[in-house]
Image: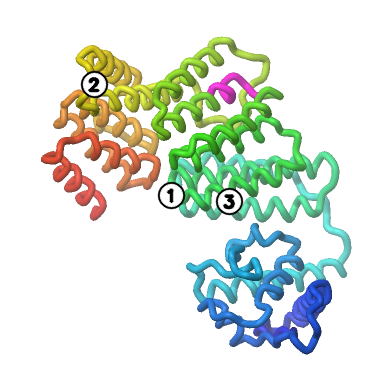
Amino acid sequence: MAVQCGLGSAERARDALNAQIVQIEDDLGIPPAESASISSDTWRRWVHRTQVPQRGIAIRALCELAGRPLTDMWWVRQDDEDGIGMVEEMNRREFLSGAGSLALGVGIAGVLAEIGPPPAPNVDTYRLEVERAWRRYVDSDPQRSAYEAGDLVELGRVLMNRSRGADREQLAGLTALAALLTGRIAFFDLGRASAAAGAWQIAQGFLAESSDYPLKAAVHGHQAFVPGWQGRWSDAEKELGMAASYARRGGSPDLRSWLHAVAAENLGRSGRSREGLAEIEKSRRVLSDGGAYPDPWWLDYFDGSRLDGFDAAASLLAGGAVLRTPESTPTARRHARDRVERALLLLPTVDGSGPWGPQDAVTALDRACGHALLEDDDRALELARVACQVLARRPYAAARGRLDQLADILPANRIVELNGIEREFAAA
């Protein structure tokens, strides 16, 4: 299967790719007479998903030459008969760029090999880059931040290939942290659950070479969000069980408390709000009991004040389930109103003065849901306006989901106003 894919003067890359394809064909027992020539036009047809002979072999060859698994390539999916295909969203330019870059990368690697062995990577410099990306992403454009974090993952991979021993292990943890950040932005900021799941799976792979147990716990805890937000508690519970086992080996009180809070949120989204409230109590006990291990520097997304937010959200779900059920007894409704009022006391006040960040939009909408459950629709819509102002400046998918919850609570005659507020700021 000869390759002529328009890679310019990268003869070294083409020769390496052709040799790899021949080896794969030999391993698969494909006679040379059955192999197909791949021209530039063939590469282009792949973009339009036209079946061509042995296309999977060439894709696999590119990946193996790059030293990267198929599942790690953004432009490859594994669901064709031969197990390999193209992502549907990819256009011609993206495919040619991705394939060409891989092959050209093989070419430059060969050039560098002739120069001599690579210098040892500077772990401290890479650590500073990861820390900088982590701390500034909240105030940055989320899509740009996701790509910057992804670039750091790629850089970390290269540096790991040039390192050994303790340096390699440190780089593995830092690269996993960059992948964790990529997933956080994809999930919470951009609402791309599948992308987040992929990023967190990559982080887990890097951590196979690390003994950073708190970070392993954090990655599994984040992975629980994907099934949990879809109401699949049993799958989320498995991830949280693995997270808890790692957290016992060095997890700070805040980290272990966060895992219970994550369980509470996922239980609530699975219709098990009472069990979620029990997890909140466990979370508070963990914080109260304390522990010997300090917080890692990256655990800036949870503390006692954030637990109040989880508590309020769980209380709103539990109270709302009763108040929105016509058959609920007067006593049950009274207790549910008390629970909602307690949730409002837990949440910070929102007056619209700002400046507000993405998490403040979540707070405003949680308060809006509470007021709507107490039939104070005017206040609920005022808070929705504040949240939409924030989201117009800085997208945050986790907050937008709360708008849907509010719409489910408001009476039909007020939903028109909510929709108007959303349209007003969407056009701004």
* Magenta stretch: includes residue 256: yes
Give the Cα separation between the discs numbered 3 and 2: 42 Å
In the image, which is nearer the foreground, mark 1 or mark 3?
3
- Within the magenta stretch, is there residue 327? no
Q: Is residue 263 above or below residue 413?
A: above
Image position of 46 (left or right of 363): right
Judging by the rendered image, the residue that carries numbered circle 2 is: 328
Residue where numbered disc 3 is placed: 198
Amino acid, disc 1: Leu
Magenta-tinted stretch:
251-257
Disc 1 designates what residue? 190
Pointer 2 and pointer 1: residues touching (CB < 8 Å)? no
Quadrant for the N terminus in the image: bottom right
Residue placed furthest toward the left:
413
Which of the marked residues, 3 or 2, is nearer the chain's N terminus?
Answer: 3
Q: Predominant secondary structure in magenta? A: helix
**Residue at x 82%, y 72% (from the top left corner):** 27
Where in the figure is residue 170, as x and y percent of width and height? Answer: 75, 40
